[in-house]
């Protein structure tokens, strides 16, 4: 790609920040979608300084608020003819159940539905850019089951790990749906696990989950290491034949059997399409 326009969520911290910096160093124009404009501006300045690339921009986008996602997509649609790389990287795990202003469970909204709306709203620009869409999933998807009848955890006791596992499972379904539906239009899509990475991720966890994070901490890799597979998928030549796949350590990896469920994949697409309809 001669001139590459990259849009990334979660570029203000951890894996996303390292990814944005590395891609700016490679000469990409980088659009950071940020929920905190002050923090976003600080990170933008840092990336410009360290990459010596002035083409770094911030756009406000709170992925837990579908109006905000829609507005961010409109801003990008109005300023960009084409997008070559979209990195749906932002995410989080939430100790307590939280409901967003749209009435959605927070883990689902931030990790899945916000990105589903963003990606679909940018589809014209993505098609023009023959884009790669990269969804940062997790090995945590193995804990996930598709609870389509109880997305908001109203009938099942909320579990931070299970809610996170389901959202990361949905990242893999979403990836395969994008590859299937938009592959013929020149779009490719990839999911990945970044590794167990020392970032702000999980900072709000409590109790047993906090202890688990503490136990894992000596084995965690740096954010720079954790960004490697995303950077690889954003820049590698000739990987389109692997569109729809899940990657670890820059290679195709096996998913859980649940993540291979084609019916669930299609159900997620239909349900998500209905849910974003008021914001489309
Ligand atoms: N760390 C790991 O071991 C690990 C393992 C597997 C998968 N992952 C995945 O990797 C991705 C990046 O995580 P990380 O480890 O780099 O965590 P992080 O340091 O906590 O970064 C998360 C990023 O997401 C942004 N974000 C959170 N909620 C948002 C919202 N409502 N709207 C917009 N942006 C929001 C944060 O913005 P602020 O800067 O404003 O907080 C931050 O930029 C996530 O999808 C995570 O699930 C991480």
Image (spheres, rainbow, N blue to C red):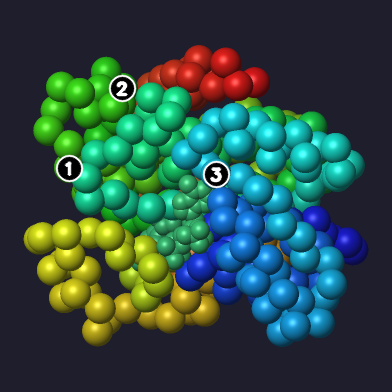
Which residue is at the front of the view, 240 or 161? 161
Contact (CB < 8 A) between labels 1 and 3?
A: no
Q: Position of residue 151 (x, y in %)?
A: 30, 26
Q: Earlier in the sequence, mark 1 or mark 3?
A: 3
Q: Position of residue 6 (x, y in %)?
A: 74, 56
Q: Is residue 4 left or right of residue 262?
A: right
Q: What residue does disc 1 label? A: 159
Q: Is residue 99 left or right of residue 211?
A: right
Q: CA distance from mark 1 to mark 3?
A: 23 Å
Q: What residue does disc 2 label? A: 148
Foreground mark, 1 or 3, reads 3
Q: Is residue 204 left or right of residue 56?
A: left
Look at the picture and state if 199 lies above or below 273: below
Q: At 72% across and 75% down in the image, what residue appears?
A: 45
Q: CA distance from mark 1 to mark 2?
A: 16 Å
Check residue 62 in the rendering and tell me which mark sits there, or answer none.
Answer: 3
Foreground mark, 1 or 2, reads 1
Q: Earlier in the sequence, mark 3 or mark 2?
A: 3
Q: Earlier in the sequence, mark 1 or mark 2?
A: 2
The reply to whether the residue tagged 3 has its Cβ within 8 angstroms of ligand 1 is yes
Q: Secondary structure at mark 2?
A: helix
Q: Secondary structure at mark 3?
A: loop
Q: Secondary structure at mark 1?
A: loop
Label 2: few (<14), some or many (≥20) within 10 Å? few
């Amino acid at each position: 790609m001669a001139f590459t326009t990259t849009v990334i969520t979660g570029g203000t911290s951890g894996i996303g920040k390292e990814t944005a910096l590395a891609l700016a160093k490679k000469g990409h124009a980088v659009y950071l979608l940020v929920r905190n404009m002050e923090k976003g501006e600080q990170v933008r300045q840092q990336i410009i300084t360290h990459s010596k690339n002035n083409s770094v921009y911030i756009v406000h986008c709170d992925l837990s608020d579908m109006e905000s996602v829609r507005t961010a997509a409109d801003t990008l649609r109005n300023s960009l003819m084409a997008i070559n790389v979209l990195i749906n990287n932002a995410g989080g795990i939430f100790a307590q159940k939280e409901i967003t202003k749209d009435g959605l469970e927070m883990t689902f909204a931030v990790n899945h539905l916000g990105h589903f709306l963003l990606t679909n709203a940018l589809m014209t620009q993505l098609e023009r850019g023959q884009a790669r869409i990269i969804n940062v999933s997790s090995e945590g998807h193995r804990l996930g089951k598709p609870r389509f009848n109880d997305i908001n955890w109203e009938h099942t006791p909320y579990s931070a790990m299970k809610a996170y596992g389901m959202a990361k499972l949905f990242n893999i379904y979403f990836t395969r749906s994008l590859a299937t539906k938009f592959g013929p239009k020149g779009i490719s899509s990839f999911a990945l696990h970044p590794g167990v990475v020392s970032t702000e991720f999980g900072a709000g966890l409590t109790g047993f989950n906090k202890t688990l994070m503490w136990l894992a901490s000596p084995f965690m890799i740096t954010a720079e290491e954790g960004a490697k597979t995303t950077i690889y998928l954003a820049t590698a030549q000739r990987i389109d034949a692997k569109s729809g796949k899940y990657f670890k350590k820059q290679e195709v990896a096996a998913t859980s059997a649940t993540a291979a469920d084609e019916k669930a994949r299609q159900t997620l697409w239909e349900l998500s399409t209905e849910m974003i309809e008021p914001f489309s």
